[in-house]
Image: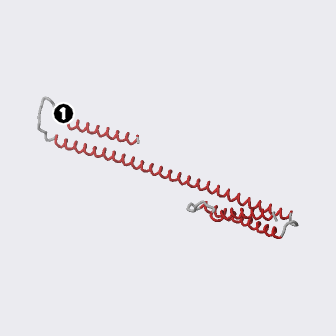
Amino acid sequence: MPMNFNTLFRAFDAAMALRDAAKRFRGDAPSPQTPDTTLSPTSAPGSALVGQIETRLTNVVVAALKEAFDRDHARMELERAQLEEQRRRAEEALRLELRRQAADRELARLRLIGSAALIGWIASVLLVVVRVNSLSPVGRGLSAAGWLLLLGSLGAAFSAQGRLNGAVTESSTPIDAGAGGTLALWLLIAGLAVSAMAMLF
């Protein structure tokens, strides 16, 4: 911007210098000894030439100013577009970060459910092995049902984790474990409850 105005000022100074030179060449100031109000035949063409030069110089200065303002306007529009693009990228990065955090929380919940189901299944198997002779047929049946429920919870948790990993890469898919996450939780609760009941028989 400062370079544009320096160029314009120099052009304007040059125009003014040419104008002053043209006025001196034309000889605007008449001598006081010969007051004459009429124009001589040689002064009219010089006057017309100076008028044309002044008009052209004025047009050049105006065109230069217009070009400088247009260039500044284009630069401001470009900067505004760049700022808008940076703002859009920042919003997109924030949205992706929020999605990633939500996915991490949901994955941690599903891993906790899966770990609890696996630990509950192992504990139930160990208890049955230890008390295999003292368990009644009803207790053995309930233990088997508890194993199936806990293994089902573990499988549902793994399935929900796979679905959630796919949802993270797709921006249009909501971050939700879906029915698999809910099923894994209820199967875990039911499996633990049935396994606990099996120990009573």
Q: Which residue is mark 1?
A: 29
Vertical arrangement, residue 187 with respect to residue 66, above or below: below
Residue at image point 33% right, 45% down: 65
Q: Quadrant of the N terminus?
A: top left
- Residue that extends furthest to the right in the rendered view of this protein: 133
Could you tell me which secondary element the residue under label 1 belongs to? loop
Residue 122 at what x, y percent from top left?
Answer: 79, 62
Question: Where is 83 relative to 35, above or below?
Answer: below
Q: Nearer the viewer, residue 191 or 73?
A: 191
Front position in the image: 56 or 40? 56
The picture quadrant where one finds residue 109 is bottom right
Give, as a three-letter code, the residue at label 1. Answer: Ala
Residue most extreme to the front: 201
Image coordinates of residue 20 in percent, x first then y, are: 26, 36
Position above or below: 66 against 145? above
132 left or right, relative to 6: right
Give the percent coordinates (x, y) of residue 14. 31, 39
Q: Classify 10 Å Cα crowding around label 1: few (below 14), some (14-19), many (20 and above).
A: few
Taking 127 as reference, is 84 left or right?
left
Image spot of residue 113 (x, y percent): 70, 59
The foreground one among 127 and 52 is 127
The reply, left or right, for residue 43 in relation to residue 195 is left
Relative to 50, is 13 on the left or the right?
A: right
The C terminus, quarter of image: bottom right
User: What residue is shown at x 39% (from left), y 46% (from top)?
Assistant: 72
Q: Where, by quadrant of the figure, is residue 118 drawn?
A: bottom right
